[in-house]
């Protein structure tokens, strides 16, 4: 495989690049180091794939890249680049979301036309569902995003399916459910909570803590992504959830056990656009991708805590 990974300096994209390289594939990574979180963190993420042979890194926005050159010989595209984060997608920053999430996807899909690409795997999100679908969430439920971020992720997913149906791009979309683990983005709850515990600072929790999430360890998300590149059915959407659906209050209890520290929890107002519950029905991914999440919440939290304790990440 000669793979193109967009968002290769990001949390999931850097792990995916590592995994593909470990498997002996060639990887071209592209990232423009958006300022959503510090460049230094992304430089550290990408230093891992960069240290391996067969990895080429290109610093560029997707919208500005020389695609005929970059796609030369590429057999698989893994499109993970995006402006992430639900909360900052309201207000004037929305244009960043439309640019990074919708326009960039359209540019990449256009660039893939008439090329011998075997799979185009798009990283979608559980945020496309919103609160009005039955739990566990099935891919055939009608998505009704609650946040502008979710709208842009869904629009890009539709673009992928449109380019599949009309132009034959072999697109597969994966709806990731809250991914965590080493290199997790600094704005995400596990990173914030575990850093606070390490530094003996209070944990800031939005809402009553009874909201639930289906947490997915990054290595499991990466395994599903590689499998989608190999055998995802073009035109299909797959949920990728770790199967650990717990409330945020329960998460904090697990963190207290794993770290041996006593959390000081400060509650603040629920955030606009945050879903109440997420829980993936992963039957389709199990059949087509042989996706079986392997890492328990306890082990995953332990791994992220060890990473935070031994690295010096920039905390918000
Ligand atoms: N982390 C999660 O829990 C989660 C959940 C659901 C979906 N996702 C999706 O998975 C993907 C990866 O998420 P992540 O948490 O690793 O995010 P991340 O922010 O760590 O990584 C995304 C990377 O994309 C880069 N990027 C953004 N726009 C770009 C552009 N126009 N051109 C080039 N590079 C660009 C950024 O600089 C960043 O390094 C995203 O598409 C995200 O929407 C993530």
Image (spheres, grey):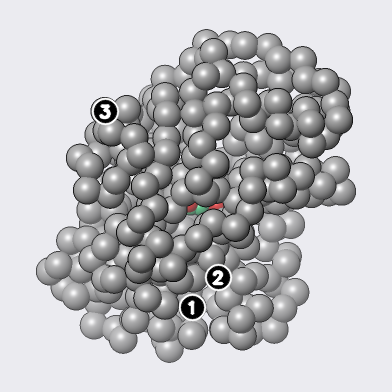
Q: Residue at x 49, y 70 (%)?
A: 226
Residue neighbourhood size for the residue with mark 3, other residues' Cα within 10 Å, grouped as few (<14), some (14–19), many (≥20) = some
Q: Position of residue 310 (x, y in %)?
A: 87, 48
Q: Position of residue 249 (x, y in %)?
A: 62, 22
Q: Relative to 54, does residue 135 appear above or below in the rendering?
A: above
Residue toward you, 302 or 95: 302
From where the camera sits, is residue 316 visible?
Answer: no
Q: Position of residue 73 (x, y in %)?
A: 43, 88
Q: For the residue with label 1, is its CB less than 8 Å from the closest atom of ligand 1? A: no
Residue toward you, 49 or 56: 49
**Helix, strand or loop for disc 3:** loop
Give the labeled residue for mark 3: 132
Q: Relative to 59, does residue 140 appear above or below in the rendering?
A: above
Residue neighbourhood size for the residue with mark 2, other residues' Cα within 10 Å, grouped as few (<14), some (14–19), many (≥20) = many
Give the labeled residue for mark 1: 3
Given this view, does label 2 or label 3 mark the residue nearer the observer?
Answer: 3
């Amino acid at each position: 495989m000669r793979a193109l990974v967009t968002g290769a300096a990001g949390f999931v994209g850097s792990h995916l690049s590592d995994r593909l390289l470990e498997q002996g594939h060639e990887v071209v990574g592209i990232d423009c180091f958006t300022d959503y979180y510090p460049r230094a963190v992304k430089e550290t993420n990408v230093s891992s794939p960069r240290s391996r042979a067969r990895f080429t890194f290109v610093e560029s926005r997707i919208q500005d890249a020389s695609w005929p050159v970059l796609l030369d010989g590429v057999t698989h595209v893994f499109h993970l680049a995006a402006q992430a984060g639900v909360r900052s997608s309201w207000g004037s920053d929305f244009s960043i979301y439309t640019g990074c999430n919708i326009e960039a996807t359209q540019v990449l899909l256009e660039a893939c036309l008439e090329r011998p690409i075997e799979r185009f795997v798009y990283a979608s999100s559980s945020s496309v569902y919103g609160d009005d679908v039955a739990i566990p969430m099935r891919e055939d439920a009608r998505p009704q995003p609650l946040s502008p971020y979710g709208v842009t992720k869904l629009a890009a997913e539709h673009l992928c399916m449109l380019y599949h149906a009309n132009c034959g791009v072999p697109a597969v979309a994966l709806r990731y459910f809250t991914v965590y683990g080493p290199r997790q983005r600094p704005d995400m709850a596990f990173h914030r909570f575990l850093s606070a515990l390490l530094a003996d600072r209070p944990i800031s929790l939005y809402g009553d803590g009874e909201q639930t999430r289906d947490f997915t360890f990054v290595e499991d998300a990466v395994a599903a992504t590689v499998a989608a590149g190999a055998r995802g059915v073009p035109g299909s959407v797959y949920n990728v959830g770790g199967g650990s659906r717990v409330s945020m209050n329960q998460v904090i209890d697990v963190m207290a056990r794993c770290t041996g520290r006593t959390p000081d929890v400060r509650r603040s107002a629920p955030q606009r656009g945050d879903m109440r519950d997420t829980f993936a029905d992963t039957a389709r991914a199990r059949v087509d991708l042989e996706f079986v999440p392997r890492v328990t919440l306890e082990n995953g939290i332990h791994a992220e805590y060890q990473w935070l304790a031994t690295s010096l990440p920039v905390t918000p």
